[in-house]
Image: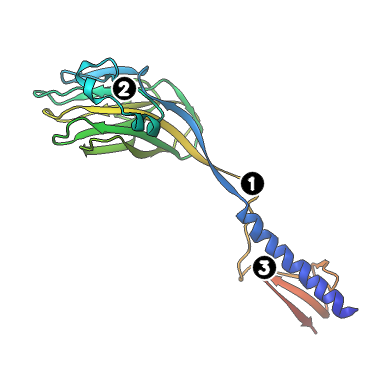
Amino acid sequence: MKKFYTMLALALVAAASSFSAQAQDESETTVVEVYKSDMVNWTFEKVAGAHGWEELKTNEYFDDCQLTEKEQETCGFDNGICVEYDDNNDTDAWAISPAIKLEADIEYVINIYLKSVQGGDGENLRIMAAKDATVDALKAGTECLDVNGYDTFSLMKQDGSFTPTETGDYYFGVQCYSNAENFGLIATGFTISYEQTSGVSVVVADENGVMEYFDLQGRKVETPSTGLYICRQGDNVKKVVIK
C-alpha cells in the first residue's frame, strides 16, 4: 500500500510539472488590426516639387499603372495614392493621416505597400509619427520607416514599427522625398497592427528553482522533518529521505 501511495504521489507531482509545460504551449498569438487605409482621404501637403500626393485612380499620368487584380488582392485595396514624375525638382510631399488612438508601450507594426512606376534612381519614402497633424511636427516626430532607393515595379509590402510613450491620438505622415528625374511612386495599404497573446501562459521553473516537498499522499509540506518525501525542483521529481 505504501508503494502505491508513493507511485500515486509521484504521478501527481510529475503531472503538475507536465501540465505547466502543456499550458504554456496552449497560448496563442493573434494580430490585432488597429487601422487600415488606402490613404485616399488623408490630408495632402506639398512642401517642394511640382507634384504632391494625389489619388491614384484620378491621376492621368498613372493610367497605365493602376493596381492589377493580383496586387489588389495582396493589399486589400483597389486604390491608393501616387506622386508624379518631376524632372526638375526634388520632391517633398506629405500624406497625413487622421487621428489614430494608440496605447502606450505597445509595439505597433506599421505596414505600407509601394510600387515604383518605371524605376529610375529609386524612390525615397519615410513614415513619421507625431502628436500633431502638421508637417513641422511630423518632421520632428518619431521615424517609423525609411525606404531609400525603392525601384521595384511590382507592389511590395514594407515593414516598420512604432511604440508610443503615452496613450492618446497620433498622426502619421507618409513623406515622399525622392530626387528629381525619378519616375513616380504608388503607395497603398497603410496598416497599423500589434500582436496579442491569449490563452494560458505559465512560466515553468528551471532545474535551479526552489525545492518543493510533498508527503507520500501528494500533499505539499512547507517544513519537512525526518522521513520519506517527494521532492520537486523545476521539472525534476524524485524521492528523498530526510534523517
x and y percentages locating residue 203 in the rendered image: 62, 57
Q: Which mark, by number, is residue 199?
A: 1
Q: Are marks 3 and 1 in contact (CB under 8 Å)?
A: no
Residue drawn at (45%, 25%), measured in percent from left and top?
100
Label ID, residue 53: none
Q: Quadrant of residue 130?
A: top left
User: In 3D space, how far apart are the residues under numbered discs 3 and 1 (Cα atoms)?
Assistant: 26 Å
Q: Residue at x 18, y 36 (%)?
A: 122
Label 3–label 2 contact, CB within 8 A: no
Please state, as top left, top right, bottom left or bottom right, where the C terminus lies in the image: bottom right
CA separation, marks 2 and 1? Answer: 39 Å
Of 236 and 188, which appears nearest the observer?
188
Badges 2 and 1: C-beta atoms under 8 Å apart? no
* Image quadrant where residue 36 sits: top left
Image spot of residue 195 (x, y percent): 51, 41
Q: Which residue is mark 2?
A: 95
Question: Where does the image place residue 165, in percent across and percent down from the top left?
Answer: 45, 36
Label 2 crowd bin: few (<14), some (14–19), many (20+), radius 10 Å: many
Q: Earlier in the sequence, mark 3 or mark 2?
A: 2
Kindly identify which residue carries mark 3: 210
Vertical order, 24 against 86 (above or below): below
Q: How many residues crowd around disc 1 within 10 Å: few (fewer than 14), some, or many (20 or more)?
A: few
Q: Nearer the viewer, mark 3 or mark 1?
A: 1
Residue type marked 1 = Gly
Q: Nearer the viewer, mark 3 or mark 2?
A: 2
**Considering depth in this image, is 207 or 20 the residue closer to the camera?**
20
- For this orientation, the residue located farthest to the right is 1
Numbered marks: total:
3
User: Which comes before the other along the chain, label 2 or label 1?
Assistant: 2
Residue type of the residue flagged with mark 2: Ala
- Indicate the colouring scheme: rainbow
